[in-house]
Amino acid sequence: GLLAIERGPVLYAMESIDQPGSPYLFDMVVPKETAIEEHFDSDLLGGVTVLTGKAVKNNDTVDFKAIPYNVWNNRGGGQLMVWMPASDPYILPEPKPSIASRAQQIGGWGYNDGITPTSSADINTPYHYWWLKKGTEESVEYRFDKAETVSSVDVYWLAFEHYDVGYKAPKSWKLLYKAGNTWKEVQNPSGYGTETDKYNHVTFHPVTTTGLKITAQLQDDCSGGIIEWRIEN
């Protein structure tokens, strides 16, 4: 199954910045019998006790490092894992590179990891949400290093009840592409779907562009977000 690592009352987590090799975390197995060592690192995050041990990644034995969960997200963007696979059936294989995974995310984070969620309430992998926004128009972008020719996208909307705010698919949305210094809506979109628990597939007249933007009109009574946004040429 899945396991969490604790030292006394302190919950630990892995961040990709601390792991050797690939920054992708979700294909790493930490067997329950793994021996874990601890040491105090005075130079890390103001001084913390870190836990180290052996994990299995792509059939190879690798070292891992875990830090206290309360000091995560202080060293730039990256992946985080708290519940760690203890056996192969629980890993998520690393997705193949794509137009989306190569793009820079603007105005958000977590929607280009390539991992298909199990539902619109699946928050076990990275996702983007518009925190405490209701009834507003919000947007996220992809910026490409070079012009890409694209003709369809797939959007998987976030939808679940949080104790502070609820999330639903937006009331409506549009897809824009970068044309010089301006944004234009794509031509002949097949329909801007707002269904949950599935990818909403949209085809359109092919464009060659350096950027795409989703503009979403949120529901009046709740917020919204995107778990995954795929692009096809």
Image (spheres, grey):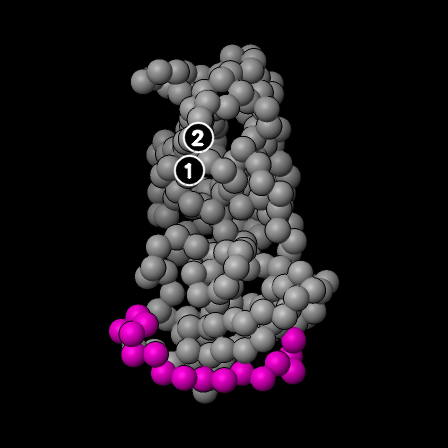
Q: Amino acid at mark 2?
A: Phe
Q: Quick check: can you spot residue 69?
A: yes
Q: How many numbered marks are there?
A: 2
Quadrant of the snapshot with the C terminus: top right
Q: Position of residue 166 (x, y in %)?
A: 45, 49
Return the residue found at the far right: 89
Q: Earlier in the sequence, mark 1 or mark 2?
A: 1
Left or right relative to 66: residue 201: right
Find residue 143 and report its image quarter.
top left
Residue at 50% x, 63% y is: 20
Return the residue found at the far left: 46
Query: In this picture, is 20 found above or below 186?
Result: below
Q: In the rendered structure, which segment of residues is drawn in magenta?
A: 31-46
Residue at 65% x, 75% y is: 31
Quadrant of the snapshot with the N terminus: bottom right
Q: Position of residue 207 (x, y in %)?
A: 51, 16
Residue at 37% x, 37% y is: 106
The residue identified by callout 2 is 144
Pointer 2: residues within 10 angstroms few (<14), some, or many (20+)? some
Between 33 and 130, the one lying in front of the other is 33
Query: In this picture, is 6 found above or below 157?
Result: below
Query: In this picture, is 44 found above or below 37?
Result: above
Q: Main secondary structure of the magenta part?
A: loop
Between 222 and 76, the one lying in front of the other is 76
The residue identified by callout 1 is 104
Assess whether residue 70 is covered by the magenta stretch.
no
| Label 1: which secondary element | strand
Between 107 and 221, the one lying in front of the other is 107
Q: Amino acid at mark 1?
A: Gln
